[in-house]
Structure formats: C-alpha cells, structure tokens
C-alpha cells in the first residue's frame, strides 16, 4: 500500500533532462557573458526559482538575453526526451493503486506542454500540474507544493514530494510533506542532497517504491 498522495518534480526526476539543463545553462552563460561558469556556481541556481529568477540572480542586467539563449538551446532538444529509467512504470503503478499524483515544476507551462508533446505517455498520469506560471514564488518556497496539494484536495500528512535537488527537499519540508530525494538527476550529487537532510535518499526505483510504501501499523 502506498502513500495517498505523491507529488513529483519533473526535470531530473521523471524525465532525464539533468545533462540537458546543465548544458543549456553553460551555453547561455558562454553565449551571453562570454565566460565559462563553474559547476559549483551553477549548482546554486539549477533546480530552484524560475528560469528568469535564476538568470536575474546570475546577471540582472543581462537576464533577458540569458533566458533567450537558454531557451533557444534547450527547447529544440526536448525532441530527444526520455523517462528516467523505471519512472513511467512507477507512475502507472501509482495510478493503478489510486494514488493522487501531482506534478510541481519550475518549468513554465509552455515548456511542460513541450515535454508532454514529445513524451505523450505523460498525458493522463497526473491529477494536478503546477508550473512556474501558477505561483509567484517558486522552490525552495513551498508555494508550488501547497498549490498542488490544494488542486489534489489533499493534506500533507500522508504525502511526499519527490525531487532531485536540495531545493526540492527544502520545499517539501516547508510544505509539511515527506521529502524524498533521488540521485539520478545528473546535477546534484548525493553529498549535496544529504546536506538538505531529506527524509529519504534513493538511488534506484526499487528504493523509491519502498520509500513510497506505507509502513504497517
């Protein structure tokens, strides 16, 4: 038996976009600012806030150019999207078990739709979708997760948020959800995830399934 409610991050958690996001960020910085961004500096941005907020924090006076360069590189490459191994099957299993499934991502709505276009298997898997367009505040703020819970008609007590960044963990904790960090995102390693102190860190689908199961009373 599973938890009654599970909300997922999208990039690096359900779909294998971690390397693409990192490459897109590096490309934008190189194209617009003419420099190579250190991976440690990049990790301070990727996985939290909206893309526009990330670029404003990086270089406020060039943020629009950075956003445009990022999107010009990133969006055409969505055509090669794939699920993270085992995630499609897990989502189907959760649906079959009548688990309420939500999606809360810092992608804007149009980019979420692009992902759904290239991975049509995503259609119908989620009972609620929250994108960057739906809230004024973004992860690590809990606002997207709180909205997802409202859309699902659920309370955080018997729910979890699954993501691949420390910012996902912080948002889950602030929303009162169980925090589950996955290591397969390709950007934030296990050491960095551990610093955020999630309830559980998992490296395989089998471990994630076990983390989503309700322990017998």
Image (tube, grey):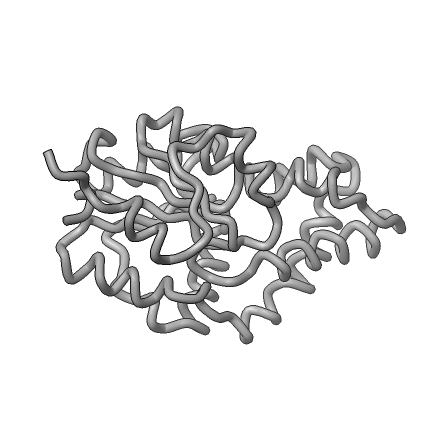
How many labels sit on residues? 0
Figure quadrant of residue 69: bottom right
Horizontal side of residue 37 vs 20, given as left or right:
right
Most distant residue in the right direction: 34
Where's residue 42, x and y in %?
Answer: 71, 42
Where's residue 167, x and y in %?
Answer: 52, 35
Frontmost residue, 150 versus 100: 100
* Residue visible at 30% across and 40% down in the picture: 148
* Residue visible at 37% across and 48% down in the picture: 8
Task: Check the image and report above or below for 137 versus 71.
Answer: above
Horizontal side of residue 94 vs 132, given as left or right:
left
* Residue visible at 31% across and 36% down in the picture: 147
Most distant residue in the left direction: 217
Frontmost residue, 160 versus 118: 160
Where's residue 62, x and y in %?
Answer: 78, 42
Horizontal side of residue 211 vs 96, given as left or right:
right
Q: Quadrant of the C terminus?
A: top left
Figure quadrant of residue 56: top right
* Residue visible at 59% across and 65% down in the picture: 75
Where's residue 118, x and y in %?
Answer: 45, 73
């Amino acid at each position: 038996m599973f938890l009654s409610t599970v909300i997922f991050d999208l990039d690096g958690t359900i779909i294998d976009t971690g390397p693409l996001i990192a490459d897109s960020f590096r490309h934008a910085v190189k194209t617009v600012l003419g420099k190579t961004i250190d991976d440690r500096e990049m990790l301070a941005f990727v996985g939290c806030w909206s893309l526009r907020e990330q670029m404003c924090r990086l270089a406020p006076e060039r943020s629009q150019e950075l956003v445009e360069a990022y999107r010009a590189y990133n969006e055409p490459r969505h055509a090669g999207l794939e699920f993270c191994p085992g995630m499609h099957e897990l989502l189907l299993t959760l649906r079959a078990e009548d688990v309420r499934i939500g999606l809360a991502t810092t992608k804007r709505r149009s980019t979420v739709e692009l992902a759904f276009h290239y991975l049509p298997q995503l259609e119908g898997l989620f009972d609620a979708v929250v994108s960057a367009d739906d809230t004024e505040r973004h992860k690590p703020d809990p606002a997207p997760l709180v909205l997802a819970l409202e859309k699902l008609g659920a309370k955080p007590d018997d729910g979890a948020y699954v993501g691949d960044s420390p910012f996902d963990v912080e948002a889950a904790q602030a929303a009162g959800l169980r925090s589950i960090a996955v290591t397969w995102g390709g950007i934030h390693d296990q050491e960095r995830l551990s610093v955020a102190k999630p309830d559980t860190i998992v490296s395989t689908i089998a471990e994630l399934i076990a983390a989503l199961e309700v322990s017998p009373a």
